[in-house]
Each structure stands twice: as C-alpha cells, then as structure tokens.
Amino acid sequence: MPFDRSYVRENRESQLQECSSKIEQRQVQIHDLGIAIERVRETIANIDKEINESGASVSSLRENIRVRKLMRDIAATKAEIDSHDMEEAAKFKRNFENKYNIEKQKETELQSKVCA
C-alpha cells in the first residue's frame, strides 16, 4: 500500500479548518456569555438599588408613624389643657394670693414676737 502524502495533507487541512471553525464558535459563545454576564450584573445592580430604596422607604414610614403619634399626643394634651376652666383657675389663684398674703403677714408677726 503506497503512502499518499496528498491524503495526509488534505486530512490535516480539513482538521485545521474544523479546529478553526470550532475556535470561532467558541469565541462567539464567549462573547455571548460575556453579554449574558453583563446583563446579570445589571439585574443584580437594579435589585440592590431597589433593596436600598426600600430601606429608605421603611425608614421614612417609621418616621411618619412617629410624627403622627406625636401629633396625636400633642392634640390630646391640648384638649386636656383646653378642658380646664381658666376662669376657675384664675379665681383659685386670686384666693390663694389673698390667703397667702394674710398668712405671710401672720408669720412675720409671729417671728417678730419670737425674736423680740
């Protein structure tokens, strides 16, 4: 059986072409995978952004709840203050001041008698 160099050369050439074709296919796959990876990274970045924004929203909601509670407490305190009769309070204050002055004079007189 004679050795045919053309067969070997053609076979190598076909193998080389097949290898080149596979390399091109792999390069296309690598490129496509790179694009897919970038899309996944963008998706992760968007999810992270949403998580951070939701944290800020939760904080804002908590602050709103706290402010509303304080406003209710202020309204309740104001209502309690308004429920007191100011005229009656002024009357009691005048009575106290009158009695206080009288009692203070008595005390001063007693102290002067004791010291004398």
Image: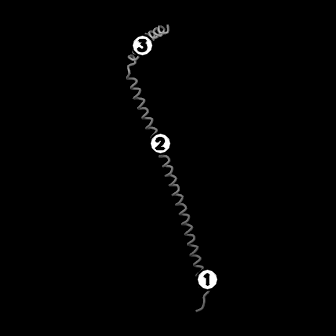
Label whose residue precedes the other's in the sequence (3 or 2): 2
Q: Quadrant of residue 96?
A: top left
Q: Which residue is at a point 42% across and 13% down the rendered structure image?
A: 94
Relative vertical location of residue 78 with respect to residue 59 in this rendering, above or below? above
> Spatial distance from mark 1 to mark 3, Cα to Cα?
125 Å
**Which residue is label 3 attached to?**
94
Q: Nearer the viewer, mark 1 or mark 2?
A: 2
Q: Which residue is at a point 54% across and 60% down the rendered structure image?
A: 35
Q: Nearer the viewer, mark 3 or mark 2?
A: 3
Of 59 and 20, the residue lying toward us: 59
**Which residue is label 1 attached to?**
9
Q: Are marks 3 and 2 in contact (CB under 8 Å)?
A: no
Q: What label sits on residue 59 in the rendered view?
A: 2
- Mark 2, Cα crowd under 10 Å, few <14 / some 14-19 / many 20+, is few
- Element under disc 2: helix
Asked if residue 7 lies left or right of residue 100, the reply is: right
Label whose residue precedes the other's in the sequence (1 or 2): 1
Q: What residue type is labelled 3?
A: Arg
In the rendered image, residue 65, in percent from the top left (x then y), is placed at 43, 38
